[in-house]
Amino acid sequence: MANKKKTLPVFVLLALLQLYVPAKMILDREDILHSGKEYKFKTQPIDPNDPFRGKFIALYYEEAVVEIQSEADWLPGERIFVILTTDKDGFAKAHGLSKEYPADNQDFLKARVGWVTDNGTNMLTIEYPFDRYYMEESKAYDAELAYLESQVDSTQTAYAVVGIKEGEAVLKEVLINEVPIEEIVLNKRKNQK
């Protein structure tokens, strides 16, 4: 009997903990979207093909390759901090990289080193934590086609809007010429009817 009295509170505590952890993760992401600073990251074409990851658009960013001073200082997979600024058109630019947590007055995000050249060109590829845009299954194929078309057409500008707060990043939406990709898909379907 005494054993049952001890088991019930432990069970209740574990159940509450299991509810708290995902709720905290969701609330943290929502906080970044609502109170974080938004950055627009210009995208480049990529042709994904992976049936095991679900319906998504794979994103590759123009600001993914940066010049570094020494190839020997960086290792693939290493965590880095990308110092951010914006260009004259309002798109995010990698202003610098650091292995140390940046000063409080700098906008930054946590990322990883993708690869580093070993031929003296001193180039590093950043693996941003927002390289996939997941969508409702029925819209994903049309959205991927619209996105790929925008990447081929140099008159169109495709970019991702990302909320960033204290180094954490959340991908908010993907736009083509200032129009959300979901809206493009809906308009395309209306025009086909």
Image (spheres, rainbow, N blue to C red):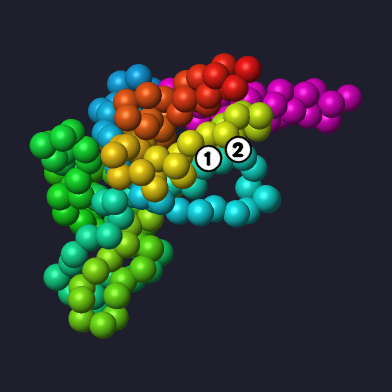
Most extreme residue toward the right is: 1
How many marks do you count on the picture? 2
In the rendered structure, the answer to whether residue 1 lies left or right of residue 88 reads right
Q: Position of residue 164 (x, y in %)?
A: 30, 34
Q: Is residue 116 above or below residue 138?
A: below
Q: Residue at x 22, y 41 (%)?
A: 92
Q: Residue at x 30, y 55 (%)?
A: 64
Q: Identify the residue position indicated by label 1 in the image.
A: 145
- Check disc 2: other Cα within 10 Å, few if <14, some if 14-19, many if 20+: some
In the rendered structure, the answer to whether residue 79 lies left or right of residue 182 reads left
Task: Kindly indicate whether the residue at mark 2 contacts the one at mark 1 (C-beta within 8 angstroms).
Answer: yes
Q: Which residues are magenta?
A: 1-30
Q: Tell me if residue 83 is in the magenta stretch.
A: no
Amino acid tagged 2: Tyr
- Check disc 1: other Cα within 10 Å, few if <14, some if 14-19, many if 20+: few
Q: Quadrant of the C terminus?
A: top right
Q: Is residue 51 above or below residue 141?
A: below
Amino acid tagged 1: Leu
Q: Position of residue 135 (x, y in %)?
A: 57, 32
Q: Identify the residue position indicated by label 2 in the image.
A: 141
Question: To which quarter of the image does residue 31 belong?
Answer: top left
Q: Nearer the viewer, residue 20 or 172?
A: 172
Q: Nearer the viewer, residue 14 or 53?
A: 53
Q: Is residue 7 above or below residue 145?
A: above
In the rendered structure, the answer to whether residue 79 lies left or right of residue 83 reads right
Q: Position of residue 32 (x, y in %)?
A: 36, 27
